[in-house]
């Protein structure tokens, strides 16, 4: 994700060469939208790992649902 962020920040600065605050604002709008899903997944995994039944929940997470 860091390489993508660097490239996208560079593109935003290039597109707003005379207005660095506008470039950062444009970059941040996209970054927040991209990282929202990763933040939700991280919070979900933290919930699993800190639960009293973490072992069975992790096992269930990594095993595909039986049909």
Image (cartoon, rainbow, N blue to C red):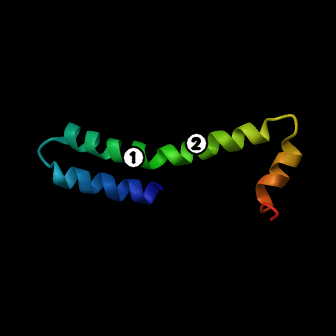
Left or right, 16 with respect to 4, comes to left
The quarter of the picture where residue 11 lies is bottom left
- Where is residue 33? Give x, y as percent: 41, 45
Q: Which residue is at a point 31% across and 46% down the rendered structure image?
A: 27
Q: Is residue 35 left or right of residue 8?
A: right
Q: Nearer the viewer, mark 1 or mark 2?
A: 2
Q: Secondary structure at mark 1?
A: helix
Residue at image coords 84%, 54%: 59
| Coordinates of residue 53 in the picture (x, y in percent) | 87, 39
Residue 39: image x %, image y %? 55, 42
The tag on residue 40 is 2
Q: Residues within 10 Å of mark 2 (few under 14, many from 20)?
A: few
Q: 17 left or right of 12?
A: left
Q: Earlier in the sequence, mark 1 or mark 2?
A: 1
Judging depth in this view, the residue of 32 and 2 nearest the camera is 32
The structure residue drawn at horizontal position 11% and vertical position 45%, both measured from the top left corner, is: 18
The residue wearing badge 1 is 31
Task: Determine which of the numbered discs, if any, sits on residue 42 in the image.
Answer: none
* Residue 47 higher or lower than 3, as above or below: above
SS class, disc 2: helix
Quadrant of image for the C terminus: bottom right
Query: Where is residue 63 shown, x and y percent of the image?
Result: 80, 61
Q: Residue furthest left?
A: 18
Crowd around label 1: few <14 · some 14–19 · many ≥20 (10 Å):
some
Nearer to me, 12 or 37? 37
């Amino acid at each position: 994700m860091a390489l993508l962020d660097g490239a996208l920040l560079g593109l935003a600065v290039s597109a707003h060469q005379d207005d660095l605050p506008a470039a950062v604002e444009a970059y941040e709008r996209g970054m927040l939208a991209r990282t929202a899903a990763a933040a939700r997944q991280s919070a979900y995994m933290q919930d699993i790992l800190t639960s009293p039944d973490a072992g069975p929940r992790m096992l269930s997470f990594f095993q595909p649902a039986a049909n």
